[in-house]
Amino acid sequence: MSALGHYLEEEGIATTIVSLIRVHSEKVRAPRNLWVPYELGRPLGPPNNPALQKQVLQAALDLLERNDGPGIIEDFD
């Protein structure tokens, strides 16, 4: 998905990625990454926690306002 982000950005479409493996984000340097500390398959956090899932999505979307990339990696607390 990170490589696709580069292509879309070249076409003028802003992208953001929710990343589960930080080292991949560091190597690929996609334009905007939100690193989350959750297990594989659960990028928005544990099931049945819509409030937390909304926070993750909002944090990822907030990265769209940044233009200081590529390679922005924000940690989700």
Image: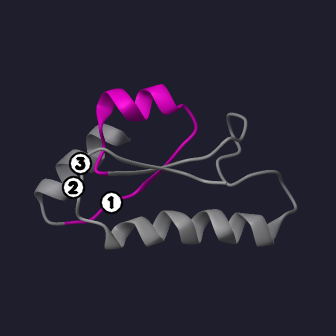
What amino acid is labelled 3 in the image?
A: Pro
Q: Is residue 68 above or below residue 18?
A: below
The colour scheme used here is: one colour
Residue located beneath label 3 in the image: 70
Few, some or many residues within 10 Å of mark 1 (<14, 14–19, 20+): many
State yes or no: discs 3 and 1 in contact (Cβ < 8 Å): no
State yes or no: discs 1 and 2 in contact (Cβ < 8 Å): yes
- Mark 3: secondary structure: loop
Q: CA distance from mark 1 to mark 2?
A: 7 Å
Seen in the image, is 55 located left or right of residue 6? right
Numbered range of the magenta stretch:
13-31
The percent coordinates of residue 55 (x first, y second) are 66, 69
Q: Is residue 64 above or below residue 35?
A: below
Few, some or many residues within 10 Å of mark 2 (<14, 14–19, 20+): few
What amino acid is labelled 1 in the image?
A: Thr
What residue sits 68% from the left and 39% below the top?
41
Which mark is in front, 3 or 2?
3
Q: Is residue 18 above or below residue 57?
A: above
Which mark is in front, 3 or 1?
3
Verify whether residue 14 appears in magenta: yes
Q: CA distance from mark 3 to mark 2?
A: 13 Å
Residue located beneath label 1 in the image: 15
What amino acid is labelled 2 in the image?
A: Leu
Verify whether residue 64 appears in magenta: no
Residue located beneath label 2 in the image: 8
- Mark 1: secondary structure: loop
**Quick one: 25 or 50, which is closer to the camera?**
25
Counting residues from the start of the chain, the first of labels 3 and 1 encountered is 1
The percent coordinates of residue 52 (x first, y second) are 76, 65
Indicate the quadrant where residue 57 lies.
Answer: bottom right
Q: CA distance from mark 3 to mark 1?
A: 11 Å
